[in-house]
């Protein structure tokens, strides 16, 4: 027998607007990391905000759970339905128009299903920069970037996605729409409502469009791969670069030797640019937006590296710069080629990060003989991907079976250092236990109150972000 609400949803979006069977549907049911798999009777592909609002209204009427999905590159299973087979997936990919570019006001208004690469390209065609920079930019979508408050490799200078949003258009859980796309730099007229939805992972509202900040395009860049003795030396280098270059310092990414080895082995075109092997490396970049200012960023970079790095390769042309960036951006891909990985997306205060890496690294060496530490990432933001890579010729299933114990130990240590168990990837369905363990009862109670106020029936991305109350 046909299910009347599902038939109403299909009639609403039309034949081009849904999938209810076939291999294409499978892509929506599993996350990028293949950690989660769910079931769903229907993937909805609405064509515009009006259709999204009507879909939500029908779902609200029948208490049908809705799982918003963007590019499905998220790391925590936030866009994957549960296995009840009752939740519908709401994919935003057809809302993919650039609505407006305002180079004079440095703002761009885009629909949620635009890919990040599309938005960066649109900004560039107006001689502006949209600075969010993620390895997944060709696939992830602006709605997903907003919903996860994405970070990446330019946070040091431009902030996370939250800092780049001027306003949002959001469909609420009852189908009403907040039309908040004003490109205002200042607006203290009551609560900044759009802020609520940034980082809420689809649990408070569905983002259908965003008004984003643009910046002048850098006209000069100086990029280097530096070798340093250890993470403490990397932090000293960071401090020296900040002092010398101020806000021109836009990237500071740490990589261990294993990252260089894995990318050189598994990624075509990547090679170690040094003739000697070093223990630790930093990819760093200074960028100047005003040519002829006498900024001399290349000279600044070379001088600081001469004083603070063991060795360094400074890119002298675009091709060399791209090769250095490729090494950093393909570390996750190289990790996949090399086998199983137990990942942590943590942040601790920069002043203690070197001590943290030593203590947590010693624990890994002593307790995970079949794993190798590959701690890399956004050192300039105090954010590390403290990952443990399965050693060659070991058993993946045995290695992964110990993941819960390893996560617990590392996250407890992070908490002792005053840090967080989720710096940029969010919570999704992966880190609900951590929410319960590390968030205070007061923090959780306020989050539940916000959820209750905005989605009293609990139909928006059920089972994500918030651990069930009282469990
Ligand atoms: P999805 O995975 O589709 O969804 C993520 C969450 O957002 C889900 O909870 C979903 O329900 C919700 N959501 C999606 N769209 C909407 C919407 N329109 N309205 C409401 N909720 C919505 N992340 C970083 O922060 N920094 C990095 O450096 C980084 N690098 C990456 C590199 C690679 C190679 C890969 C594969 C991923 C990387 N990521 C990184 C993770 C991921 O790309 C980001 O979290 C990204 O913001 C997710 O966007 P998406 O469109 O794929 O969202
Ligand atoms: C990155 O910074 C991403 O490359 C992915 O956030 C990190 O795979 C990871 O652990
Ligand atoms: Zn990252």
Image: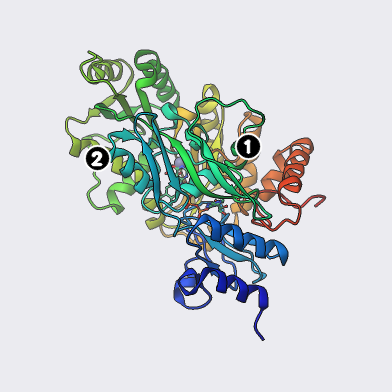
Q: Which numbered circle lies on residue 322?
A: 2
Q: Which residue is mark 1?
A: 193
Badge 1 density bin: few <14, some 14–19, many ≥20, Cα 10 Å: few
Q: Residue at x 40, y 33 (%)?
A: 154
Residue 128 drawn above or below residue 146 = above
* Color theme of the render: rainbow
Between marks 1 and 2, how big is the CA–CA gap?
39 Å
Q: Residue furthest right?
A: 470
- Nearer the observer, 220 or 354: 220
Q: Residues within 10 Å of mark 2 (few under 14, many from 20)?
A: few
Q: Give the quarter the ligand 2 occupies.
A: top left
Q: Is residue 186 above or below residue 7?
A: above
Give coordinates of residue 313: x percent, y percent.
23, 29
Q: Residue, x 51% and y 39% (percent of image)?
A: 181
Displayed quadrant of residue 62:
bottom right
| Direction from residue 448 to residue 149 in the image, left or right | left
Count the marks. 2
- Residue 403 can be seen in this image: yes
Foreground tag (1 vs 2): 1
Q: Is residue 424 or residue 160 the one in the foreground?
A: 160
Q: Earlier in the sequence, mark 1 or mark 2?
A: 1
Q: Residue at x 45, y 76 (%)?
A: 23
- In the rendered view, tell whether residue 316 sits above or below residue 336: above
Instruction: Tell me the SS state at disc 1.
Output: helix
442 sits to left or right of 59: right
Residue at the (43%, 57%) spot, across then down: 339
């Amino acid at each position: 027998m046909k299910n009347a609400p599902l038939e109403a949803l299909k009639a609403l979006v039309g034949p081009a607007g849904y999938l209810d069977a076939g291999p294409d549907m499978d892509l929506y049911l599993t996350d990028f990391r293949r950690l989660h798999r769910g079931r769903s009777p229907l993937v909805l592909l609405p064509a515009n905000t009006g259709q999204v609002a009507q879909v939500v209204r029908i779902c609200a009427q029948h208490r049908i759970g809705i799982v918003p999905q963007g590019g499905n590159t998220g790391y925590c299973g936030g866009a994957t339905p549960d296995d009840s087979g009752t939740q519908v997936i709401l994919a935003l990919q057809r809302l993919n128009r650039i609505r407006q570019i305002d180079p004079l006001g440095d703002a761009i208004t885009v629909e949620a299903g635009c890919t990040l690469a599309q938005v960066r390209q649109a900004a560039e065609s107006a001689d502006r920069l949209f600075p969010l920079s993620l390895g997944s930019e060709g696939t992830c979508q602006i709605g997903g970037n907003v919903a996860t408050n994405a970070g990446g490799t330019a946070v040091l200078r431009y902030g996370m996605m939250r800092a780049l949003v001027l306003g949002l258009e959001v469909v609420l859980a009852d189908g009403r729409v907040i039309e908040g796309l004003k490109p205002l730099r200042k607006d203290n007229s009551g609560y900044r409502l759009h802020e609520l939805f940034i980082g809420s992972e689809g649990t408070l509202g569905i983002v259908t469009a965003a008004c984003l900040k643009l910046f002048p395009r850098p006209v000069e860049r100086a990029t280097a791969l530096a070798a340093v003795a250890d993470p403490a030396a990397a932090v000293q280098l960071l401090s020296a670069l900040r002092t010398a270059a101020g806000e021109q310092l836009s990237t500071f990414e740490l990589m261990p030797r294993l990252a260089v080895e894995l990318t050189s082995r598994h990624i075509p075109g990547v090679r170690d640019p040094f003739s000697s092997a070093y223990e630790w490396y930093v990819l760093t970049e200074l960028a100047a937006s005003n040519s002829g200012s006498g900024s001399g960023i290349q000279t600044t970079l070379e001088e600081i590296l001469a004083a603070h790095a063991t060795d360094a390769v400074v890119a002298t042309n675009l091709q060399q710069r791209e090769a250095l960036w490729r090494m950093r951006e393909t570390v996750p891909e190289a990790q996949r080629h090399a086998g199983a990985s137990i990942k942590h997306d943590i942040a601790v205060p920069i002043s203690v990060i070197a001590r943290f890496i030593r203590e947590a690294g010693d624990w890994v060496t002593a307790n995970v003989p079949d794993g190798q530490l590959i701690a890399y990432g956004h050192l300039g933001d105090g954010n590390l991907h403290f990952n443990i890579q399965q050693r060659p010729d070991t058993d993946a299933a045995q290695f992964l079976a110990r993941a819960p114990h390893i996560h617990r130990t590392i996250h407890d240590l992070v908490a002792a250092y005053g840090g967080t168990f989720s710096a940029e990837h969010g919570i999704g369905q992966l880190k609900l236990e951590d929410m319960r363990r590390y968030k205070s009862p007061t923090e959780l109670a306020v989050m539940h109150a916000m959820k209750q106020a905005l989605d009293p029936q609990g139909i928006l991305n059920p089972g994500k972000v918030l651990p069930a109350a009282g469990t």
